[in-house]
Amino acid sequence: MKSNTRSIFIALLAVGGMASATLATAQSGRGGIYQQELSVCGHNQQDRAACIREAGAARQEAARGGLTGAPDYRANALARCGLQ
């Protein structure tokens, strides 16, 4: 009886952990990146107003599905080197 209760408790903890991880991922996907981009504004060489506009434009484009992921810097570098 004691081991069954322990197994159920461990299973509930695991399910709770997975649910909270899924929730954190969903929240970071929606507004987390936008908040990170806004936090940089004012701490870089770019005008703060322009930085905020660009962060908003990126957020809108991501909502439309236009931003699919991080750029492939390696492929970009190889393409530029191929020209020389």
Image (tube, rainbow, N blue to C red):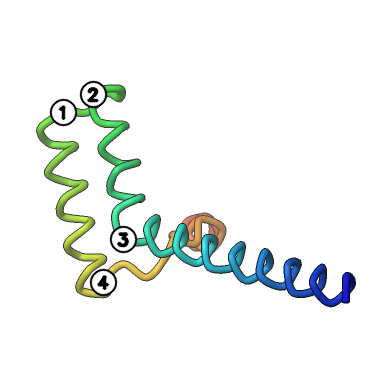
> Is tag 3's residue or tag 2's residue first in the polypeptide sequence?
3
Name the kind of residue labelled 2 in the image. Answer: Gly
Name the kind of residue labelled 3 in the image. Answer: Arg
Residue matched to label 4: 66
Residue 49, given in percent of the width and then of the height, sits at 10, 32
Name the kind of residue labelled 1 in the image. Answer: Arg
Observer-nearest of 29 and 24: 24
The alpha-carbon separation of the residues under discs 4 and 1 comes to 24 Å
Q: Is residue 55 visible?
A: yes
Quick check: marks 3 and 4 in contact, CB under 8 Å?
Answer: no
Residue matched to label 2: 42
The crowd level at tag 1 (other Cα within 10 Å; few <14, some 14-19, many 20+) is some
Residue 80, given in percent of the width and then of the height, sits at 47, 56
Q: Residue at x 49, y 62 (%)?
A: 72
> Is tag 2's residue or tag 4's residue first in the polypeptide sequence?
2
Q: Is residue 80 above or below residue 4?
A: above
Observer-nearest of 46 and 56: 56
The alpha-carbon separation of the residues under discs 1 and 3 comes to 22 Å
Q: Residue at x 27, y 23 (%)?
A: 45
Name the kind of residue labelled 4 in the image. Answer: Gly
Q: Residue at x 24, y 30 (%)?
A: 41
Outermost residue on the front side: it is 1
Q: Nearer the viewer, mark 3 or mark 2?
A: 3
The secondary structure type at the circle numbered 3 is: helix
Residue 30: image tag: 3
Residue 28, given in percent of the width and then of the height, sits at 40, 55
